[in-house]
Amino acid sequence: MKKNSTFVAVVIFLSLILGWAIWNYFLGAPSNFADPLIREHPLKDSTLGKMYSGGFIVGILIGLSIMAFSFIVERFISLSKAKGKKDLDQFLKNAGKYLDEGNLDAALDLCNQQKGSVANILRAGISRYKAISHNDMLTTEQKVEEVKKTLDEVGMLETPLMEQNLVILSTLASISTMVGLLGTVKGMITSFAALGDSGGGAAASQLSIGISEALYNTFLGIFTAIIAIVFYNFFTNKVDKFTYVIDEASLNLLETIKTRFIAKKA
């Protein structure tokens, strides 16, 4: 968890720094303005200059967008590792076959090759089964309960890893919308201030700056929120499917163990 906290802090810091740098040096490049020194009058065909005129909040929103994409990539990589190296359905099929045959070593080797959250949980259960299978001091029910306890304990460790950082995507969706709204309000204040200073005949350039500030902030805030919400729901669905697979695999393992113990006892 400490390692993940450090990763999150680094991503947040670097994303905000990079967002500010893009706003200040790329969008605010002198070549995008009629007056390169003050950078206040973007060229007519310069979209980048107009985005720069949206103010420093544009830089924050760019940073939030980079942050969202960073955690999206991180989640793709983490869930891919949780799935394991090979096809998950085929792995479960082969593991079930070995367990039905009572070939625990082959099942363990398969889990070691597969890796990932599902394989880790099954490996822990199988290892526990192997350790207590010849213990005559335990009843069948006690042995099954021991394996179930092991599966639950390892599952409680693996599941949070799959859900890790999803709350950040959810938070980014809310924050980016609010920050975009803040930029919109700031832009409208600028527009009305320019209108008041000109006595009702505000200079077109001043109105343009204020409206640009409002609209670009709105666009970036909504864009980031949409991306974060879509992928939050996508990853949540993926985690739910993984959880179902883990529960099903654990149940099948327990049923197989119980059946073999009962058959052996009989």
Image (cartoon, rainbow, N blue to C red):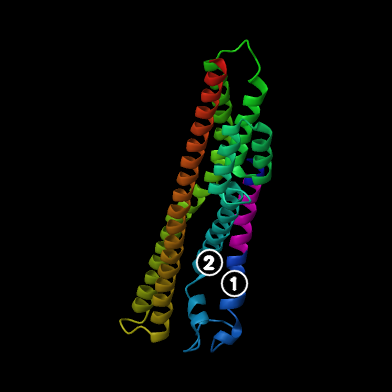
Q: Residue visible at 47% across and 57% down? A: 231
Magenta residues span 5-17
* Residue 7 placement (x, y as % from top left): 64, 50
Q: Residue visible at 57% across and 25% down? A: 147
Q: Which mark is residue 39?
A: none
Dot 1 falls on a residue whose secondary structure is helix
Pick the front one: 218 or 39: 218
Pick the front one: 8 or 242: 242
Q: Is residue 19 above or below residue 159?
A: below
Q: Estimate how packed mark 2 is, as few (under 14), some (14 to 19) or many (20 or more) residues with alpha carbons within 10 Å.
A: many
Q: Which mark is residue 62?
A: 2
Q: Is residue 41 above or below residue 262?
A: below
Pointers 1 and 2 in contact (CB under 8 A)? yes
* Label whose residue precedes the other's in the sequence (1 or 2): 1
Magenta stretch contains residue 103: no
Residue under label 1, please give it.
22
